[in-house]
Amino acid sequence: MMLILQTVATVFIFAPFLAFFLIYIAARKPLKRRAFLVAADLTTLVLFVAVPVLIYAIWSYEASALVCFVAIIIAIVFLVIEWKNEKELKVRVYIRKTWRLYFVVLAFAYLMIWTVGLIFTVSRFMLDSYGA
């Protein structure tokens, strides 16, 4: 049983958009319009793990602390913006907006890292095989 859970977790870490798609499909009927938001919220958790793992897999660089640091900076900047725009800060709304912003930033980062990593790996393979 533990091996199955470990395999599923590994697949979702290396393919977080598969997790997003499956959660969205599962939540589409009961939650209707909110299914996308629920899928994004749950996938954000996966992306917080997937981005550092992908960076480590491609470049052997430990980036967990960097991802946490960037998340904290985003939260602080977003808090200042919310505080300036709203008279009264609603904590629950702020956390929800910040979490959704994390989804967008991490999804973009994952796609960019994946694309750059693919180009890096292919170019390294081509240079090793056909180059000098």
Image (cartoon, helix red, strand yellow):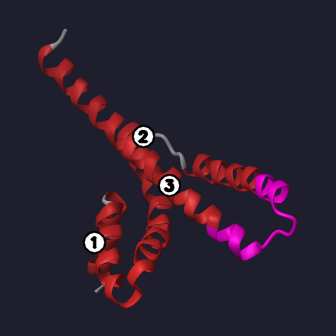
| Residue 28 is a magenta residue | no
Q: Which mark is residue 7?
A: 1
Q: Main secondary structure of the magenta part?
A: helix
| Residue 84 is a magenta residue | yes
Element type at mark 2: loop
Whole-number angstrom distance, CA of label 1 to CA of label 3: 26 Å
Q: Assess disc 3: are there few (<14), some (14-19) or many (≥20) residues with their C-alpha within 10 Å of its C-alpha.
A: some
Whole-number angstrom distance, CA of label 2 to CA of label 3: 25 Å
Element type at mark 1: helix
Q: How many marks?
A: 3
Looking at the picture, tell me which residue is in the foreground, 74 or 122: 74
The image quadrant that residue 22 belongs to is: bottom left
Label 2 sits on what residue type? Ser
| Residue at x-position 48% and y-position 51% | 52
Above or below, 53 relative to 13: above
Q: Position of residue 49 (x, y in %)?
A: 47, 60
Looking at the picture, tell me which residue is in the foreground, 72 or 8: 72
Horizontally, residue 40 falls left or right of residue 1, namely right
Element type at mark 3: helix
Q: Nearer the observer, disc 1 or disc 3?
A: 3
Horizontally, residue 45 falls left or right of residue 80, namely left
Q: Position of residue 90 (x, y in %)?
A: 78, 73
Instruction: State which region is magenta.
Output: 79-96
Label 1 sits on what residue type? Thr
Instruction: Read off the residue under disc 3.
Output: 104
Q: Which mark is residue 60?
A: 2
Q: Earlier in the sequence, mark 2 or mark 3?
A: 2
Q: Assess disc 1: are there few (<14), some (14-19) or many (≥20) residues with their C-alpha within 10 Å of its C-alpha.
A: few
